[in-house]
Image: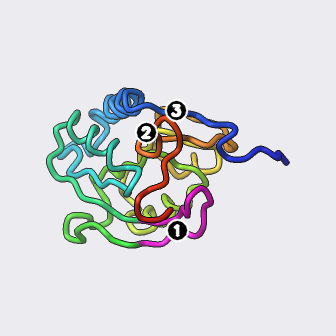
Amino acid sequence: MSDRLPHEKGFHISWDQIHRDSRALAWRLDGQGPKDTGWRAVVAITRGGLAPAMIVARELDIRTVDTVSVKSYHHQSQGEAELLKAPDAAMMGDGEGILVIDDLVDTGKTLELVRNMYPKAHFATVYAKPKGRPLVDTFITEVSQDTWIFFPWDMALQYVEPYRGTD
């Protein structure tokens, strides 16, 4: 067991890096959708999946974009995944042809919740940790389980608390 705090083994991601890695994710996903129709829509897991989903949708020319809102983190500690908002049910069906995007799969709690809702969707993340990796179909970079990823929306020259709380 390490006495290290989450931020002490940090992987700092810049806006340029998340853009490059999200484009790489799009390239990996290109042509991987259903053969007859391709990807029907992109669904971003909020909040972290919003930026990567926008980039993937742009790169793959997917115009239908929705969100699924799941809360599992409370600042830097993870709890049970809680569904806050589901995407359009008529569009989703069982998930066939839907590309679900998140920034990171950590323990897999979030993806497990969404995958149970849409078992035929394709799940893609930019980054993956070992515990959550079995729940993601496509990812770009694997990091160790004890690495804390600092995304650019969480960072300034130093850590900046969100204006409205820490959830």
Residue 114: x %, y % from top left = 43, 64
- Front tag of 3 and 2: 2
Gap between marks 1 and 3 measured at Cα: 23 Å
Amino acid tagged 1: Ala
Amino acid tagged 2: Pro
User: Viewed as shown, does residue 104 lie left or right of 33?
Assistant: right
Q: Is residue 92 on the magenta stretch? A: no
Instruction: Count the labels in the image.
Output: 3
Would you identify the image quadrant in which residue 156 lies?
top left
Q: Earlier in the sequence, mark 1 or mark 2?
A: 1
Q: Earlier in the sequence, mark 1 or mark 3?
A: 1
Question: Which residue is rendered at x = 20% and y = 70% of the image?
Answer: 90
User: Viewed as shown, does residue 30 lie left or right of 78?
Assistant: left
Question: Which residue is rendered at x = 37% and y = 57% of the image?
Answer: 46
At label 2, counting other C-alpha atoms closer than 10 Å, the crowd grade (few under 14, some 14-19, many 20 or more) is some
Label 3: which residue?
A: 141
Q: Which residues are magenta?
A: 70-83
Numbered circle sitting on residue 152: 2
Residue 44: x %, y % from top left = 33, 53
User: Viewed as shown, does residue 5 lie left or right of 167?
Assistant: right
Residue 165: x %, y % from top left = 47, 65
SS for callout 3: strand
Q: Main secondary structure of the magenta part?
A: strand
Gap between marks 3 and 2 measured at Cα: 16 Å
Gap between marks 1 and 2 measured at Cα: 23 Å
At label 1, counting other C-alpha atoms closer than 10 Å, the crowd grade (few under 14, some 14-19, many 20 or more) is some
Would you identify the image quadrant in which residue 146 lies?
top right
Numbered circle sitting on residue 81: 1
Amino acid tagged 3: Thr
SS for callout 2: helix
Residues 21 and 61: in front is: 21
- Front tag of 1 and 2: 2
